[in-house]
Image: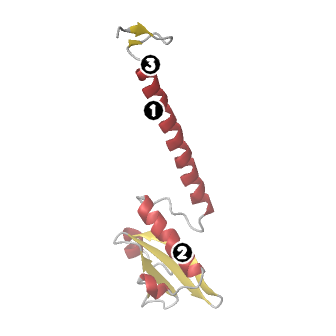
Amino acid sequence: MAKKTFPCGHKGKGKFCHRCEQEHKAQELKLMEKERNEEWQYLFNKDEINLRKLPNKTLVNKARNIISSINSGDSYTKFKGKRMRYNRDVISIPLNHDFRVIYHDCSSGLKLQSLLSHEEYNVKKPGNKS
């Protein structure tokens, strides 16, 4: 089979230009990735607290699962959450060694307060409003 020139100007053997086809598929993948990223960013706008500082999707999903479970009535102890000694109304739930989700126990129930990194958690007592 002899080489022929395709309408795009490339030369090759076959029924279509494989180079242009490969570029087209790469462009489609790029578009799909952009759409997935936009959807992911949109989910951050729906969160009760800012979860953007979490380093990966696994931790973000874990935090969302914990928050939704506690909002639906599960106990914080299921997620290894503990009350703080200096203020028994503050509840700390670990996501991993680096991040904690902080709840405040009000008369109306548990209220989501913040997400703290390890450094923020150790430097500032999470119950203080300053």
Report helix, strand or loop for mark 2: helix
Which type of secondary structure does the marked residue at label 1 adopt?
helix
Residue 100 lies in quadrant: bottom left
Name the residue located 48 percent from the left edge and 70 percent from the top edge.
Answer: 63
Q: Earlier in the sequence, mark 1 or mark 2?
A: 1
| Rendered image: mark on residue 26 | 1
Depth-wise, is mark 1 or mark 3 nearer the camera? 3
Image quarter where the N terminus lies is: top left
Q: Position of residue 40 (x, y in %)?
A: 54, 54
Q: Secondary structure at mark 3?
A: loop
Q: Which mark is residue 17?
A: 3
Can residue 42 be seen in this snapshot? yes
Residue type indicated by callout 2: Ile
Q: Which residue is mark 2?
A: 67
Q: Residues within 10 Å of mark 2 (few under 14, many from 20)?
A: some
Q: Earlier in the sequence, mark 1 or mark 3?
A: 3
> Left or right of 13: which side holds 28?
right
